[in-house]
Image (tube, grey):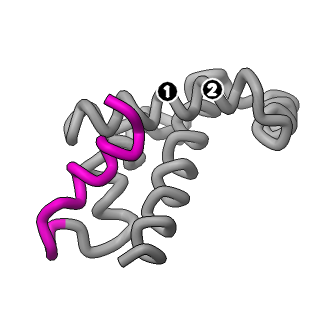
Amino acid sequence: MDPVTATLSACSHPGRVRGEAAFAWIAGVNPVPASSGRTVRHRLNHGGDRTLNAAIHTIAKSRQRCHQPTKDYIARRTAEGRTPREISRSLKRYIAGQLWRIIEACS
């Protein structure tokens, strides 16, 4: 399923998604605290709409490969000491926010 269809299917019911954070929760890309001891970190939510999550994952992987601003972001975050999983989590949450703003502008 393409990203547009997955996004529209997730937002097909009025009132189901009330904001960007709710959209990220439905997409399964909201950060969940996963800290232990002195380590403060987050992981992605494993719930939500799997089709929409797969679409966001596809967008993220495509951007990592072909989108220069994303490549610059990855290089900057790697220099900060972030792991590839943390970078991917942040990127997916950012993409969900972008999709939400597009949906809001169209409705």
User: Element at badge 1?
Assistant: helix
Q: Is 84 situated above or below 22?
A: above
Membership of 9 in magenta stretch: yes
Q: Amino acid at mark 2?
A: Ser
- Pointer 1 local density, CA inside 10 Å: few below 14, some 14–19, many at least 20: some
* Residue beneath the point at 26% across and 32% down: 51
Locate residue 105 relative to residue 10 in the image: left or right. right
Locate residue 81 relative to residue 84 in the image: left or right. right
* Residue beneath the point at 36% across and 64% down: 21
Q: CA distance from mark 2 to mark 1?
A: 6 Å
Q: How many circles with numbers are drawn on the protein?
A: 2
Residue 38 rendering spot, x and y as whole percentages: 54, 37
Q: Which residues are magenta?
A: 1-16
**Quadrant assignment, res 46:** top left
Q: Is residue 31 visible?
A: yes
* Residue beneath the point at 36% across and 53% down: 24
Residue 39 or 82: which is nearer the viewer? 82
User: Element at badge 2?
Assistant: helix
Locate residue 29 relative to residue 28 in the image: left or right. right
Q: Which residue is mark 2?
A: 62
Quadrant occupied by the N terminus: top left
Q: Amino acid at mark 1?
A: Thr
Q: Which residue is mark 1?
A: 58
Disc 2 to disc 1: CB gap under 8 Å: yes
Residue 20 rendering spot, x and y as whole percentages: 39, 66
